[in-house]
Image: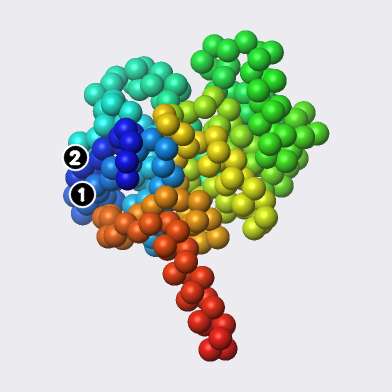
């Protein structure tokens, strides 16, 4: 890891509920990541990955630990300040898409630009370009409910990229995509989301996209258990699959 730190998180803790109903999701997570990187969080369901990225995106407050995101601690901001900070710095690809059904696909993608005050004309033009990049040219005026799950996911990805966020947080970005489309979309995420002043953090179970990540961060039971180079992890997976095939 090199370059300017985008994330410096130490001892992050999060518990849901109180008393006998309390569930500890994070038990002291440490993670540092630099601008220019793509970092993938992997691990079994319920290990705390989604909770952690929600804290990184400023959608949840932590219960303990310290954190700086692009030099800012979101928990030190009031609700209005945090909303403005998130609007200007963070893109989030939700696993459930969170598209607005009453408006067109084009308008859905333009939302981050319109919220920050860009003109409607410029916002829609930029949104149209991103839709073309994710393979949805010609569907701009469709409502989200008229699209397949994979198409909706591509709309959500375009929306997350349209305002050039410094920190892009992705929750299972390829879960509804076939292999070829997933590779194409990840190439776009890598191109648009990583750079001298940009970082991508993603949660995934999709081993087909591990090679896009600079580092694979394994989590279990609310903790980081190990960190592996993405290309080394991908090579190991391919070697294991080849060995299994030869044995068969």
Horizontally, residue 157 falls left or right of residue 102, namely: left
On residue 28, which mark appears? 1
Counting other residues with Cα less than 10 Å from the Cα at mark 1, is it few (<14), some (14-19), or many (20 or more)?
some
Horizontally, residue 243 falls left or right of residue 133, namely: left
Q: Residue furthest front?
A: 2
The front one of 93 and 96 is 93
Tell which circle, 2 or 1, labels the residue nearer the N-terminal end: 1
Q: In this view, does 221 lie above or below 130?
A: below
The front one of 117 and 237 is 237
* Rendering coords of residue 142 (x, y %): 76, 33
Q: Which residue lies furthest to the bottom in this view?
A: 247
Q: Assign the C terminus to one quadrant of the image.
A: bottom right
* Rendering coords of residue 64 (x, y %): 19, 40
Q: Residue at x 38, y 57 (%)?
A: 229
Q: Is residue 20 above or below residue 82?
A: below
Q: Residue at x 28, y 55 (%)?
A: 224
Q: Which residue is drawn at 55% across and 60% down?
A: 208
Q: Assign the N terminus to one quadrant of the image.
A: top left
Counting other residues with Cα less than 10 Å from the Cα at mark 2, is it few (<14), some (14-19), or many (20 or more)?
some
Q: Which residue is drawn at 57% across and 82% down?
A: 245
Badge count? 2
Q: In which quarter of the image is residue 101?
A: top right
On residue 225, which mark appears? none
Question: What is the CA distance from the residue labelled 2 to the residue labelled 1?
Answer: 7 Å
Question: Dots 2 and 1: beta carbons under 8 Å?
Answer: yes
Q: Can residue 65 be seen in this view?
A: yes
Residue bearing the label numbered 2: 65
What kind of element bears circle 2?
strand
* Rendering coords of residue 2 (x, y %): 32, 41
Q: Which colour scheme is used?
A: rainbow
* Rendering coords of residue 84 (x, y %): 41, 18
Horizontally, residue 137 falls left or right of residue 192, namely: right
């Amino acid at each position: 890891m090199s370059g300017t730190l985008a994330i410096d998180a130490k001892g992050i803790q999060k518990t849901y509920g109180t008393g006998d109903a309390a569930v500890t999701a994070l038990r002291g997570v440490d993670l540092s990541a630099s601008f220019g990187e793509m970092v993938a969080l992997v691990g079994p369901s319920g290990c705390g990955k989604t909770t952690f990225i929600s804290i990184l995106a400023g959608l949840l407050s932590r219960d303990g630990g310290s954190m700086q995101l692009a030099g800012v601690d979101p928990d030190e901001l009031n609700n209005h300040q945090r909303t403005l900070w998130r609007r200007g710095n963070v893109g989030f690809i939700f696993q459930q898409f969170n598209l607005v059904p009453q408006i067109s696909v084009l308008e859905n993608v333009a939302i981050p630009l319109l919220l920050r005050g860009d003109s409607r004309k410029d916002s829609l033009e930029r949104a149209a370009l991103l839709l073309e990049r994710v393979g949805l040219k010609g569907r701009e005026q469709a409502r989200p409910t008229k699209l397949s799950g994979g198409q909706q996911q591509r709309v959500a990805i375009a929306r997350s990229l349209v305002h050039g966020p410094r920190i892009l947080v992705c929750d299972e970005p390829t879960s509804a995509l076939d292999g070829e489309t997933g590779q194409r979309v990840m190439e776009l995420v890598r191109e648009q989301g990583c750079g001298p002043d940009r970082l991508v953090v993603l949660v995934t179970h999709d081993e087909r996209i591990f090679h896009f990540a600079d580092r694979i961060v394994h989590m279990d039971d609310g903790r980081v258990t190990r960190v592996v180079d993405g290309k080394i992890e991908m090579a190991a997976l391919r070697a294991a699959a080849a060995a299994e095939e030869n044995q068969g």
